[in-house]
Amino acid sequence: MLHRLQLLSRNSRSHVLEFFLPDSEAHYALINRIPVELLVQIFKLCAGNEWYPDSAYVAPDPKQAPLLLCRISHHWRSVALSIPSLWSSLLVVAHCSERTRILAMAKLWLKRAASAPLSIHIQSPRHSEDRRRLRCECTYAANALDFFISHIQRCKDITVDLDPVMAERFTKLRGISVLGVEALALNIERSCSDDTVEEIIPVIASFPNLRRFSWNYPHSSFSFHIVPWSQLTHIHLITSMTLLECIIHLAQCTVATHIEFDWVEAPATEDPEVYLPPNLSVLSMVREFRLRVNGLQPAAILPHFRMPSLKSLFLTIDYYQAGCIQNSEELGKFIEESPLDDLTIIDDGGMRSADIVHLLTLPALVNVPRFELWSSHALSALDILKSTDYMIFSRLRYERSVAGVDIIEWGPTS
């Protein structure tokens, strides 16, 4: 039974509870005969988040586990309360209508989590035309952040959506050493000024044992020298950065397995090649690499690295005046030296039909088991390929996505 549960999505697991819901005294006796060890594993699998399916955090909903588990029987309640890890994850969403419940639920969660390391996501209020309501929700979200800051040494995983009020509260952590936090995700609202963001960055130094780091603020460029790149295993960086900054940061990611660098831009004036490090950097542990470039070609970055364990490469190419797949031999060499299972390229306006043909005819591409290219010029590129006898043409599949973008692919469908 456990094996079948593990194959289900987290949302589907929550519906398994319906099988156990009592409708008779006999059923009460049946569900109470399930071995405690099995019940514990089932409870852990059922704890999920129906309203926020992409979230790794649990919303305190009485109609979902773990709160629902405490309402089935005294026995189930006893078992649920005996599992601290069941209560160690919490999604805090500030609503004015639930302002008295937010902190009360947070305190209950922390009490039931006992000594288990905490995973917390404090979500900023959604944009609202009702300014009074928005101010109210911002205040309660900030109060929730204050509460968890007072328990910060218990946390292992923190995600915070920062509006200007919450950003000010978050900077209270500056200078405090938080040893237990291994994962930190900061989603910064556009309403925050650059000066406010500059105040947030030094707080990263308060988490000396970080292993996972996520930063989402694409509106301006900042210095990230304070980030402990050399100890991070998972990196998700959505921010404007130059080619040189990208390469310097990447070269330090020596133990990373998953990297995403979003929005690397071409310098406004200087030739970046003059300043780039001359040595090839080997990132031996990277298995997934996602890169978004604007005004650049991927070959300006990838040839500076070897990734001998790379399985998945995801490239997004934004506007580049012409020939964004120039130096394709360099790109082909990188692909050839990487044991890729999956290559995806998204064209957001930077590729011409000739670029796509040039890309598809790279000899190194033949050995990639699964390939996808999304581009508005894909169909015209196929028309050009039809007039050739290039061997890869017979493998290609073409379709038009819902958004009207052409897709060229081969290999197993996702």
Image (cartoon, rainbow, N blue to C red):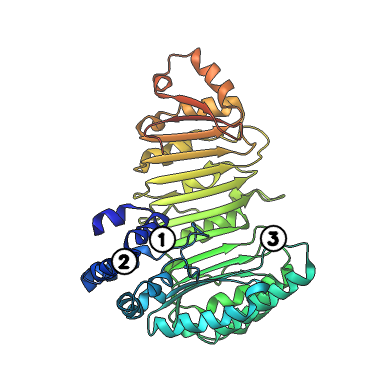
Q: As displayed, is residue 184 above or below residue 361?
A: below
Instruction: Please give the name of the residue rendered at 52% of the width and 41% of the height, measured from the top-left corner.
Output: 299
- Report the side of 319 relative to 286 (left or right): right
- Whole-percent x and y of residue 126? 67, 63
Image quadrant occupied by the N terminus:
bottom left
Q: Is residue 118 visible?
A: yes
Instruction: Please give the name of the residue rendered at 53% of the width and 35% of the height, measured from the top-left corner.
Output: 327
Instruction: Please give the name of the residue rendered at 49% of the width and 49% of the height, measured from the top-left corner.
Output: 290
Q: Quadrant of residue 191?
A: bottom right
Give amino acid for label 3.
Ser
Give amino acid for label 1.
Ala
Q: How much space separates mark 1 and mark 3, taking CA atoms?
A: 25 Å
State the SS at label 2: loop
Residue identified by numbered label 2: 24
- Whole-percent x and y of residue 411? 37, 32
- Report the side of 60 relative to 46 (left or right): right
Q: Do the numbered discs 1 and 3 sit on residues whose CB atoms are within 8 Å?
A: no
Q: Do the numbered discs 2 and 3 sit on residues whose CB atoms are within 8 Å?
A: no
Residue identified by numbered label 3: 220
Q: How much space separates mark 2 and mark 3, taking CA atoms?
A: 61 Å
Q: Is residue 275 visible?
A: no
Which numbered disc flags the more N-terminal residue, 1 or 3? 3
Residue in front for this viewpoint, 20 or 395: 20
Residue identified by numbered label 1: 256
- Report the side of 44 relative to 216 (left or right): left
State the SS at label 3: loop
